[in-house]
Amino acid sequence: NAGVTQTPKFRILKIGQSMTLQCAQDMNHNYMYWYRQDPGMGLKLIYYSVGAGITDKGEVPNGYNVSRSTTEDFPLRLELAAPSQTSVYFCASSLGKGNGGYEQYFGPGTRLTVT
Amino acid sequence: GDSVTQMEGPVTLSEEAFLTINCTYTATGYPSLFWYVQYPGEGLQLLLKATKADDKGSNKGFEATYRKETTSFHLEKGSVQVSDSAVYFCALGDTGRRALTFGSGTRLQVQP
């Protein structure tokens, strides 16, 4: 059981470039999330999904897009990268129901620098 | 909207000292409350949780009690170790999105 995996671990982008951050989970969780963590700050929700084919915006969605074609995968797309998107990105998943439904499992993160 | 406020760090303690990290929240309804820990270079791991008022979550010697009357969920440990050095995040569960709202984190440094 690998849990939540993310690739790449590190990436440097030039301003205006695009990239996709990959996230996959093997726990058959319905809910998946993307957060960003800026230095010295808590995590902010970018997008989330409650199941395949269903996505919705979080607190800070501008400059990002997501898709959820399968239960396992939840890629995050950055179009026209800007320095303000320099951050550490975490993907998470949860069962989404029951008393333990809020418990989220996090991937190891992707550290992105835009210069 | 929902929010979580944590005490600012860093908190520096000697080994075997008593630890308290304060956390208060603002939310509608009855959210679940969590403490997550982030070790250097790693993702977040769930440390403990409480799903209703007066519940006490505990794990690895850490404890926190869900206090609805004071809207608090303070983290405590009786005797910290160097290996407890990490960033600790308080969070509450959003009943609608099943997402988490995080505090800004508190860095704990334990010296031998």
Image: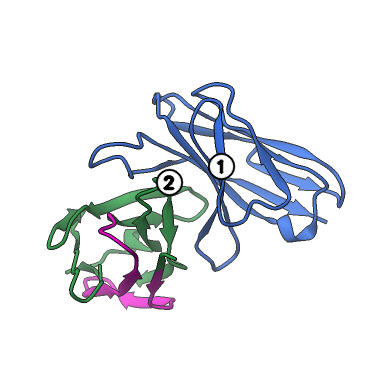
Chain colours: A blue, B green
At 73% from the left edge and 44% from the top edge, which residue is drawn? A11
Q: Amino acid at mark 1?
A: Asp
| Residue at image point 25% right, 53% down | B48
Distance Cα–Cα, label 2 vs label 1: 9 Å
Q: Which mark is residue B97?
A: 2
**Is A60 on the left-hand or right-hand side of B33?**
right
Q: Position of residue A57 (x, y in %)?
A: 58, 47
Query: Whole-percent x and y of residue B19?
Result: 25, 73
> In the depicted view, which residue is nearer to us: A14 or A75?
A75
Picture quadrant where residue B29 is located? bottom left
Q: Position of residue B104 (x, y in %)?
A: 47, 68
SS label for mark 1: strand
Q: Is residue B85 left or right of residue A25?
A: left
Residue B7, position in %: x, y? 38, 77
Q: Is residue A65 visible?
A: yes
Does the rendering let one see residue B112?
A: no
Magenta residues span B4-32
Asked if labels 2 and 1 share a chain, the reply is no
User: Was residue A60 drawn as part of the magenta stretch in this picture?
Assistant: no
Position above or below: A92 against A51 = below
Determine whether A24 is above or below B31 in the image. Answer: above
The numbered disc on residue A56 is: 1
Please indicate whether residue B102 sits to the left or right of residue A38 in the image.
left
Q: Residues within 10 Å of mark 1 (few under 14, many from 20)?
A: some
* Image quarter hosting the N terminus of chain A: top left
For disc 2, the neighbor class at 10 Å (few under 14, some 14 to 19, many from 20) is: some
